Image (tube, helix red, strand yellow):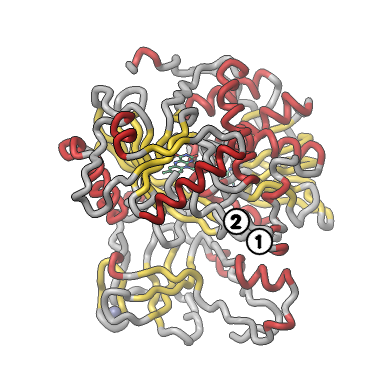
Amino acid sequence: MSADLLPEHPDFLWRNPEPKSSYDAVIVGGGGHGLATAYFLAKNHGMTNIAVLEKGWLAGGNMARNTTIIRSNYLWDESAAIYEHALKLWEILPEELEYDFLFSQRGVMNLAHTLGDVRESIRRVGANKLNGVDAEWLDPQQVKELCPILNIRDNIRYPVMGATYQPRAGIAKHDHVAWAFARKCDEMGVDIIQNCEVTGFLKDGDRVVGVKTNRGTINTEKVGLCAAGHSSVLAEMAGFQLPIQSHPLQALVSELHEPVHPTVVMSNHVHVYVSQAHKGELVMGAGVDSYNGYGQRGSFHVIEQQMAAAVELFPIFARAHVLRTWGGIVDTTLDASPIVGLTPVENMFVNCGWGTGGFKGTPAAGMTFAHTIATGAPHKLNAPFSLERFETGALIDEHGAAAVAH
Amino acid sequence: MLLIPCPNCGPRDETEFHYGGQAHVPYPENPNELSDTEWSRYLFYRENPKGTFAERWVHSTGCRQWFNMLRDTVSYDIQAVYPMGTPRPDRSPRVTPESGTASTAPDSTTTGTAGPSTSTTSILTTTAPEGATK
Ligand SMILES: Cc1cc2nc3c(=O)[nH]c(=O)nc-3n(C[C@H](O)[C@H](O)[C@H](O)COP(=O)(O)OP(=O)(O)OC[C@H]3O[C@@H](n4cnc5c(N)ncnc54)[C@H](O)[C@@H]3O)c2cc1C
Ligand SMILES: [Zn+2]
């Protein structure tokens, strides 16, 4: 773990073309999901006359703000299938994209602090194993062996009673993931257009036929929305509603330290999650702010609580300094599962609702969403994540495995 | 962190309150008559405006009373506080917060042009299904 393991900073990895007057498909949002979608549209479906429109700079939204945890230990079959597919793609993508984004499979522990946690965790390990997802239950001593700086004494308010462990889980360098996708998209002819905000849609009856942007109107046969926190704003422009609420979610980093934290540790119960970045910062996240917000900042008490939890679990952090805090805007659904599929508008498709945990899903979101856009029908992995599930009642209730701690 | 003006207790720290989501969502008047689509609207669909939002809060560690609040979801400015059961105040002209505002840093709106836009009022259509009480 040292700085010279980092890939070169990309100076000119993609062109910056002017928008054309028409494309076969337009992807709104140049975060990880939009870029991965464009990549798989070009690679798997041969659609290269396409554009990714990003209102700011490439991957400057949640893609640049997340704590980069990748895992697939979700409870329900539908989630395990899509997140595990994502993990398998993460394992081959550095080679396929010919760009090392430092995917580090250092394992993820999800701590249990109450008897309820313990039961739920053991159930999840069982469910994971049945779904072919690597998972183990660790007792406190085994937890300590894997992460020696963790405090497993039982005289704290919520002592560590064990943990689930997924050895293949880990972290990746998020900016580099975006650049890797962007570079390959560009090579295959995809136009990546930054500073291009979608401000409305052109429709012919119920069918979308174009997008209005601050850089002019673009005609297109298909539109894919990958706008994370802004999905409901775009849906509203297109004339439909999404069951989405946007919330601020914050993260923070310490100054650089020697390697002390060998794995990823998450706790839903005391609500903090910690990993050590390749350079050495301790990267920490917590839960969303309760209120709706688009301001890309959140409340200080959330940070205070997460720091209190971190110091109790990792006493040696007591003297670490916080270097930087920031916020992103996440799009949450009531069953804590994403929405990937068709919309009431013909030829318009939506990928949203990944909430606090969509970074890990990036490759599978892109692959399945590209399939949906190209063929007009869901892929078998995203079919359960349709908008209709809120009407049919076939919800995928992942609050236990997803909730806010990702 | 928000400084929320409780109508009963005065301005208090956000940590004393709990959030109750969108205000003015009436329970269906004739539940037996709702279609699946209408139920899904009532249960799962809420407004999510980028701009002024009417929402409910409860002062959990103070007077324990619920009240409604108009808040800007971009600047987090609190624009009005008003009792449960009363209609949403007209915000043109914009209500000047007398009793308190969000204690937020002025430099922290990083979304640039994302200020409250007047067009947001038009998207605040009710999510109430047919036959719902207001
Ligand atoms: C603090 C924090 C920590 C997180 N930690 C994790 C984690 O550890 N693991 C994990 O799996 N997930 C995590 N997430 C969630 C994850 O970041 C998101 O689920 C995921 O990034 C969403 O997909 P995206 O990358 O495409 O979104 P974004 O990167 O947000 O992309 C959406 C893009 O759309 C653009 N856009 C919006 N409106 C328009 C418009 N009108 N026109 C053009 N462009 C537009 C935005 O500018 C933005 O760049 C975290 C999120 C946050 C905020
Ligand atoms: Zn009060």
| Residue projecting furthest to the top | A4
- Considering only vertical position in the picture, is B76 above or below B17? above
Left or right: where does residue A209 sit relative to residue A40?
A: right
Query: Within 10 angstroms of label 2, few (less than 14), some, or many (20 or more) residues?
Result: many
The residue shown at (30%, 29%) is: A145
Between disc 1 and disc 2, whose residue precedes? 2
Q: Nearer the viewer, residue A265 or B9?
A: A265
* Ligand 2 located in image quadrant: bottom left
Query: Can residue B9 be seen here?
Result: yes
Q: Residue A60 location in percent, x, y?
A: 48, 37
- Considering only vertical position in the picture, is A177 above or below A267? above
Label 1 marks a residue whose chain is A
- Considering only vertical position in the picture, is A95 above or below A266? above
Tell me the residue that label 2 is attached to. Answer: A232
Say which quadrant the C terminus of chain B sits in.
Answer: bottom right
Q: How many labels sit on residues? A: 2
